[in-house]
């Protein structure tokens, strides 16, 4: 699969409006295509309810106001970010494309290193036609740990957790993809929309043949004739406002978009999804995926050819993941 295979024209009807307005239009559009979209399940914003849900690891759940009392939720406004942290250097993605599932150029093309304050100023005036994003950045590199407190929410275990910031303009898009660990995603400033699909319905996500962690679908520009299995799946949607959190079980497919300047934190925790889960889905997806996996296993694993970075923070291809797993199991360097 090349980056030219998935060029999908963008519809301007999705360009503006709040997260609520976006989801209303999106749900109507998907409904016309025969796709079932339900509201995201909710729970009380308490530590007890959160731990009960994360222990079951079964379904995504919205916790409205769970982190509303964090210092970050009050303090991480654009003015404060500029005044308190503006001189720190960051590497952000600038002038991102507004359409398509893959980047037209490798991710490095969009990366710029600049003072954080300059980034925030650009973020405030950027449009959805050319959004900017400070994404997948360890929170400890910018902010004091006392501004947020995941340890009081998620009971510590033997697995190393990771906390990251996602700060961007209106129009940022993390299109439908899957992560291997449990995720608590918290909205600090602004709002985002989120649409989810269970890992058990991976075939309806239409992953790339050479990378089953990323979907070929842009839900806002859906051609249901190309992706008919979505009609037999159930999507869940919701809006994240300041102080809200959503729990995503490992593997859960998610599409997250900003509709105004936005600041978010996420916390990956717990064990990684077992390799058997990926292999199970690979078997179900069929021969086209087996061939692509074998090809990337040989080309990018055995032969060591560099993989392109046309996804948003491109993960290794499925074949390269399998190659790395075998290296780990056999103890080879």
Image (cartoon, grey):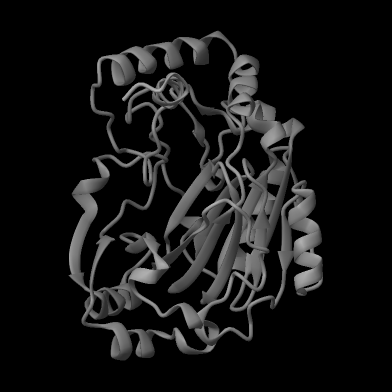
- Horizontal side, residue 75 vs residue 149: left or right: left
Q: Which of the 4 image quadrants contains residue 210?
A: top left
Q: Is residue 159 above or below residue 298?
A: below
Instruction: Tell me the quadrant of the picture where the C terminus can be found.
Output: top left
Q: How many marks?
A: 0
Q: Which of the 4 image quadrants contains residue 103?
A: top left
x, y percent for residue 15: 46, 61
Residue sitting at x 40%, y 26%: 324
- Horizontal side, residue 57 vs residue 196: left or right: right
- Horizontal side, residue 158 vs residue 89: left or right: right
In the image, 9 versus 289, the foreground residue is 289
Q: Which of the 4 image quadrants contains residue 123?
A: bottom left
Q: Is residue 46 above or below residue 206?
A: below
x, y percent for residue 98: 37, 53
Q: Is residue 253 above or below residue 61?
A: above
Q: Is residue 266 above or below residue 82?
A: above
Residue sitting at x 81%, y 60%: 52
x, y percent for residue 189: 51, 78
In the image, 7 versus 13, the foreground residue is 7
In the image, 53 versus 42, the foreground residue is 53
Instruction: Tell me the quadrant of the picture where the N terminus can be found.
Output: top left
Residue sitting at x 72%, y 64%: 62
In the image, 253 versus 97, the foreground residue is 253
- Horizontal side, residue 207 vs residue 239: left or right: left
Q: Is residue 197 visible?
A: yes
x, y percent for residue 108: 21, 47
Residue sitting at x 49%, y 82%: 147
Q: Is residue 169 visible?
A: no
């Amino acid at each position: 699969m090349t980056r030219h295979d998935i060029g999908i024209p963008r519809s301007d009807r999705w360009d503006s409006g709040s997260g609520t307005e976006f989801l209303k239009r999106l749900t109507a559009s998907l409904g016309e295509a025969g796709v079932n979209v339900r509201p995201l399940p909710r729970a009380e914003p308490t530590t007890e309810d959160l731990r009960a849900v994360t222990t079951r690891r079964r379904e995504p759940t919205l916790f409205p106001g769970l982190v509303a009392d964090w210092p970050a939720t009050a303090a991480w406004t654009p003015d404060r970010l500029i005044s308190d942290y503006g001189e720190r250097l960051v590497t952000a993605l600038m002038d991102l494309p507004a359409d398509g599932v893959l980047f037209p150029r490798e991710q490095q093309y969009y990366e710029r290193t600049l003072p954080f304050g300059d980034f925030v100023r650009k973020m405030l005036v950027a449009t959805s036609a050319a959004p900017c994003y400070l994404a997948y950045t360890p929170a400890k590199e910018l902010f004091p740990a006392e501004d947020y407190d995941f340890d009081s929410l998620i009971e510590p275990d033997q697995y190393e957790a990771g906390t990251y910031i996602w700060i961007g303009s209106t129009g940022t898009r993390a299109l439908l993809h899957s992560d291997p660990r449990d995720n608590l995603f918290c909205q600090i400033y602004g709002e985002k929309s989120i649409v989810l699909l269970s890992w058990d319905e991976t075939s309806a996500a239409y992953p790339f043949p050479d990378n089953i962690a990323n979907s070929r679908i842009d839900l806002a520009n859906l051609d249901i004739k190309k992706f008919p299995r979505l009609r037999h799946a159930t999507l869940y949607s919701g809006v994240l406002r300041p102080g809200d959190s959503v729990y995503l079980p490992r593997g859960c497919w998610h599409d997250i978009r900003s509709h105004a300047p936005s600041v978010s934190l996420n916390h990956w925790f717990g064990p990684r999804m077992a390799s058997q889960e990926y292999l199970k889905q690979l078997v179900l997806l069929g021969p086209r995926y087996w061939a692509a996996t074998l090809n990337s296993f040989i080309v990018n694993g055995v032969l060591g050819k560099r993989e392109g970075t046309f996804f948003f923070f491109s993960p290794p291809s499925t074949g390269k993941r399998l190659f790395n797993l075998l290296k780990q199991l056999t103890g080879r360097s």
